[in-house]
Image (cartoon, rainbow, N blue to C red):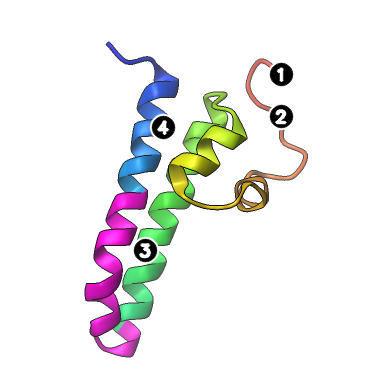
Amino acid sequence: MNGPQEQARLAVRRARQRLTEDAAALMAASGEAAEIGMETRAEELRRAVLVAWSTGVAPEDIAQDAGVELRVIRGWAVPGRTRPGS
């Protein structure tokens, strides 16, 4: 069975995939619908990143799974927050 970190990384990859797959359809929608849809998918990815961060997944691994730069991951993590057990 997968541990919490593996499950968190999988959730990040799935959120990235949904954002990527839905982007074209959302952009074809009306302006407001596209904006809301993209914000929703981006928020799902951000939340998955925060869960992965809180389980102790390395920021570099999260960035790779999310398909974003490492600085984005660090920006999403709460500044000054320590991980559980740190």
Q: In this image, 67 relative to 78: left or right?
A: left
Image quarter where the C terminus lies is top right
**Residue corresponding to mark 4:** 9
Which comes before the other along the chain, label 4 or label 2?
A: 4
Question: How dense is the environment of label 4, judged by Cα within 10 Å: few (below 14), some, or many (20 and up)?
Answer: many
Contact flag, marks 1 and 2 (Cβ < 8 Å): yes
Residue 66 vs 28, above or below: the answer is above
Q: Which residues are magenta?
A: 16-32
**Residue corresponding to mark 3:** 40
Image quarter where the N terminus lies is top left
| Residue 33 placement (x, y as % from top left) | 29, 81
CA–CA distance in space, label 2 to label 3: 27 Å
Contact flag, marks 3 and 1 (Cβ < 8 Å): no
Residue 30 image-quadrant placement? bottom left
Q: Give the amino acid at mark 2.
A: Thr
- Outermost right residue: 80
Q: Residue at x 30, y 43 (%)?
A: 14
Which comes before the other along the chain, label 3 or label 4?
A: 4
CA–CA distance in space, label 4 to label 2: 19 Å
Q: Nearer the viewer, mark 4 or mark 1?
A: 4
Q: Give the amino acid at mark 3.
A: Thr
Question: How dense is the environment of label 1, judged by Cα within 10 Å: few (below 14), some, or many (20 and up)?
Answer: few
**Residue corresponding to mark 2:** 82
| Residue 67 placement (x, y as % from top left) | 47, 50
Q: Secondary structure at mark 2?
A: loop
Q: Give the amino acid at mark 1.
A: Ser
Q: Which mark is residue 86?
A: 1
